[in-house]
Amino acid sequence: MSEYQLGQLPWLSNAHQRFVDLHYRGKSSHAHLLNVDNALGGIVLANACAHTLLCQQLTPVGACGQCKSCLLLQSGTHPDLHVVEPDGNQIKVDQIRQLCLSLTQTAQQGGARVAVITNAERLNMAAANALLKTLEEPGEGVVLILQTNRKSQLLPTITSRCQTLAFVAPQKADIQQWLADQNLLPTANAQGKIHDVTWCINVVGGPLALATSLRNKHYQQLLAYRKDWAQSLKTGHLCNSLLGLSEQQIVDALNVLYLYLRQYVLKSSSQVALATQADTSQRLNPLVQAKVLELAANIMQMCHKLQTMPSVNTQALCQQYVLAFKKVTH
């Protein structure tokens, strides 16, 4: 259960209103796909859509919050809402079979029977195939809501049977303002400029995770990694926070290095465009840029491998990338 409510995540409001409008006009499908990452509040949106379907006194902007059905939903005891979450890393076939069986039963509150499947990309093959029949023939009054972090990982036979809800992700400026509204941003510097914390949004996973990172000081650790990578790449030797990384910290540190290298190339490209003939100190030729980007891609591949590797010498790995950077840029 997310700590946030729908009204606290403004970028979800348009998508939710579209869902309400569809339901209000009787244009709603029996199966909806929400391609909205958990880090953006995908589960919050899925729950709000389920509340819309089950509310007995629906308003033009969503569930009333006061009818018996809404009160049951708020207490987490609505008998006609069925939620399926991954069991470990997968959604298993037995979970889907049990869900399909539950959906054949009569609605206890006399309205719809609603299933919410979160992280639907984790449906294993058997579970996905078991779900297909219900998607094709759901039964009267049955509505399924599938929330996914990665639509591309769902079977085409699943996505083709669902109505995808239109969603526009927030821009970094919107996220920065949202964090400011929660008083989570660092104070302005002497020039009155507020530090842009969204540079690490892809490291932490999204705005909700970034808010948590700012609250628990994890963000400060990411800043330290960025500073120390810059110094290490300049000198050729690891320094400070990069010397004692744990196996739990190495992925964060390498993700920061990946972003740093991408920014390094972007900065170089902009300087090429703006540089005068006398200002060539920071320019990189296209071949070097390509090699730096290739190194960044290798780092990202290593981040994926580290999720399954039993152990790694973090200091040696970091030094390896420092030396590789020195080789391609000198």
Image (spheres, rainbow, N blue to C red):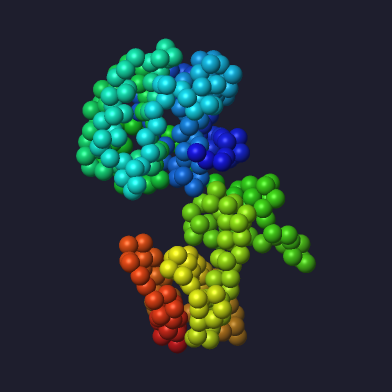
Q: Is residue 61 above or below residue 251?
A: above
Where residue 316 appears, as percent x and y from the top left, is 41, 80
Q: Quadrant of residue 63?
A: top right
Dividing the image into 4 quarters, which one contains the C terminus? bottom left
Q: Is residue 273 above or below residue 63?
A: below
Side of 139 where 197 appears, left or right: right
The residue shown at (53%, 26%) is: 75
Side of 106 where 9 appears, left or right: right
Q: Residue furthest top?
A: 110
Where residue 2 appears, as percent x and y from the top left, is 52, 40
Residue in the foreground of this view, choosing between 175 and 309: 309
Residue in the foreground of this view, choosing between 224 and 73: 73
Q: Is residue 122 above or below residue 280?
A: above
Q: Quadrant of residue 319?
A: bottom left
Side of 290 where 18 appears, left or right: right
Where residue 176 appears, as percent x and y from the top left, is 63, 52
The residue shown at (55%, 21%) is: 71
The residue shown at (25%, 37%) is: 93
Q: Does the image show residue 288?
A: no
